């Protein structure tokens, strides 16, 4: 793998890591908001019947809110994991470029 390809892998790793992390932070912010604004008991009038446990407290939300938050959480984790895998590939390829096979580190003397 040449340096240009390595730069592309590094770019892709960051391209996945940063939005994945942003999505995880967004889902945490939404959960915290839900904790402070959602009812603690089912509310049939507003259709808030789906329970969600947040920090040991159960709040009730609509099915649409539940779907949206789950979608954000799961897709963010998937994107973040893809970024981690690309970062692992980058580090592996970068390390193999630093010292080609069969060469020794400078300053080491064989007996």
Image (cartoon, rainbow, N blue to C red):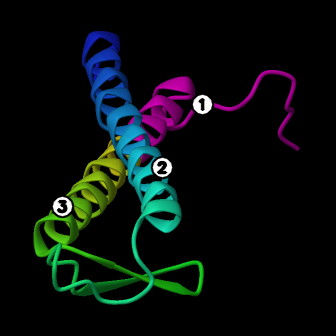
The residue depicted at 28 percent of the width and 10 percent of the height is 4
- Tag of residue 29: 2
Quadrant into which the N terminus falls: top left
- Picture layout, residue 18 above or below residue 46: above
Residues drawn in magenta: 87-111
- Picture layout, residue 15 above or below residue 71: above
Label 1: element kind: loop
Where residue 60 sits, quadrant-wise, is bottom left
Q: Indicate whether residue 34 is drawn in magenta.
A: no
The residue depicted at 13 percent of the width and 75 percent of the height is 63
Label 2: element kind: helix
Residue 105 pos. (x, y %): 74, 29
Where residue 26 sits, quadrant-wise, is top left
Front position among marks 1 and 3: 3
Residue at which label 3 appears: 71
**Which residue is more in the foreground, 15 or 96?**
15
Residue 61 pos. (x, y %): 27, 74
Front position among marks 2 and 3: 2
């Amino acid at each position: 793998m040449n340096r240009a390809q390595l730069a592309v892998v590094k770019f892709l790793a960051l391209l996945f890591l940063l939005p994945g992390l942003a999505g995880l932070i967004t889902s945490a912010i939404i959960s915290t908001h839900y904790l402070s604004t959602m009812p603690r008991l089912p509310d049939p009038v507003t259709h808030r019947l789906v329970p969600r446990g947040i920090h040991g407290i159960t709040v009730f939300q609509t099915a649409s809110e539940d779907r949206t938050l789950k979608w954000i959480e799961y897709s963010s984790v998937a994107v973040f994991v893809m970024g981690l895998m690309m970062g692992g590939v980058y580090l592996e390829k970068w390390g193999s470029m630093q010292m080609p096979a069969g060469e020794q580190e400078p300053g080491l003397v064989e007996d």
